[in-house]
Amino acid sequence: MHATPLICKVADTPAEFEQIHRLNYRTFVEEIPQHAPNGEGRLVDKFHAENTYLIVTSGDRLAGMLALRDQRPFSLDGKLGNIDPYLPSCVHPAEVRLLSVDPAFRGSAVLPLLLEKAFEQSRMRQWDMVVISATTRQLHLYAHLGFTPFGPLVGKDGAQFQPMFVRPNAVDAVLKALKKRAAPRPSCKIIGLLPGPVPVSARVRKAMADHPDSHRSANFQTVMERVRCSLCALAGARHCQVFPGSGTLANDMISLQLARLQSPGLVLVNGEFGRRIAAQAARAGMRFETLEIPWGAVFEWKAIERAIEQLPSGGWVWWVHHETSTGILNPLEKIVAAAKARALITAVDAISALGNTPVNLRDIDFASAVSSKGLCAYPGLGIVFHRQDIIEPLAHAPAYLDLGYWTTHEGVAFTHSSNLLGALDAALRTQNYPRRFQAIAQRAKFLRTRLKNSRFEVLTQADAHSCPAVLTLIPRSAPNAWETGCALEAAGYALSYRSDYLKSRNWLQIGLMGVPSQRLLSNLSRCLGVSSN
């Protein structure tokens, strides 16, 4: 019905409030004669300063609204006296008012979006009852949604309302009923702007759909060897192993190789994934120190040097190259050179760096990667790069986790997926990586420029310490990151905001690993409230 995506959010700009006053007038003066006309064509609610307005927009146009307020006395208190005797026992009630949908958007997804957001707010604010004045013209709708009437009608002839209440904990039943009643929403293709998984090409999808092949067949061995050669060429590495699994599994395999050294080590932490490899090192029983700085901060090189100097020859250092949780790009070649000067073993998590920015792993002892993210294939394959030709198998470790066991079995130690491997092969063979790196950097520059004076701050600066593949946004004001992520998801844009480490910091991330078009990013920035001027 409407080509422009519908965005549900908390109103927070002068232009949005002005449209609220005008829709308020059209609805409760011209359509429902609750208030007297005036010459301005706008109606400012008497509780305006205390209201939280939820709105749905279509581009710059207000499609619908409602107001939330939990301060007593409610509007209904003023019409019925104290409403408490009419209601079941409750501790923290709230009132919903001014529910209005522009006639052009009635029968669309506007009403479901507004009520879904209202109940989300009720859970966040721990309201245990919501009251509303329901127009008598729509009593059947409210009853169908689970609202219960209480008290007598209020208002005047032509503008009468029935007080009603609902328990927010009945939200699932209410929303289910609402969505059944609402007109079907047009199918919406979700556009992936995540740090992973990333969109895959038609050739990769075709390879994934091929007839499965035995991992012991000659053809599988040929593809595996080609994939390993391509990966090493891309990473500047000497050797690698490819296995069914995740990046976490790849890092667990590395942790066992570092643990066998029985030497102290150093883990660098300035984000979620540095914290995770420190936890993996601890589970492997390793002795190590942690150099930890605030998330999003850049390591001082002198601090890294001092920490490395404390390690004896034969020790190790482990860090994340591209810290996905922040967008920081930690140094690689400088750390390798400093470690090599002290005869230290080096290990790096290159999971979000490989394929998104130039990487040189030639002198790294161990590095982890995955088949998705910058390699643009399906998730499901883990990768460990290693400098030694052959690694001695571990005597007392699970074979699947033993990198040495894989090196002594020509890279195919256990059952493998020919489909996942074929998809990765197709991605590696069709990707022009220098052009890809340039395109990702250009998209990041474009977005940073658009967001410069918006209500979102980009966590990292555009310099050598940031990876352009991930932009972390911090809201300067309402709506918060979770609300923004939900609204964009409803509009068809999948951003990263659901992870606990993002929720706890009120962060939102845009992944550019799929190299979205500039036009798509222009549309996204408009949905984020960024002016096109």
Image: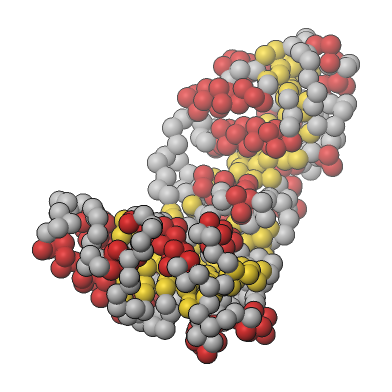
> Residue 17's spot in the image, x, y percent?
74, 47
In the image, farthest residue toward the left: 218
Tell me: residue 531, above or below residue 501: below
In the image, farthest residue toward the bottom: 341
The residue located at (74%, 17%) in the rendering is: 163
The residue located at (83%, 39%) in the rendering is: 50
Residue 278 quadrant = bottom right
The residue located at (15%, 68%) in the rendering is: 222
Tell me: residue 387, above or below residue 179: below
> Residue 126's spot in the image, x, y percent?
73, 32
> Residue 436's spot in the image, x, y percent?
38, 75
User: Horizontally, is 130 left or right of 432 in the view?
Assistant: right
Question: Which is more toward the observer, 397 or 115?
Answer: 397
User: Horizontally, is 328 left or right of 423 in the view?
Assistant: right
Quadrant of the snapshot with the N terminus:
top left
> Residue 320's spot in the image, x, y percent?
52, 70
Q: Would residue 510 be visible to someone looking at this image?
A: no
Residue 69 quadrant = top right
User: Horizontally, is 180 left or right of 86 in the view?
Assistant: left
In the image, farthest residue toward the front: 395
The residue located at (60%, 26%) in the rendering is: 171
Q: Would residue 145 be visible to someone looking at this image?
A: yes
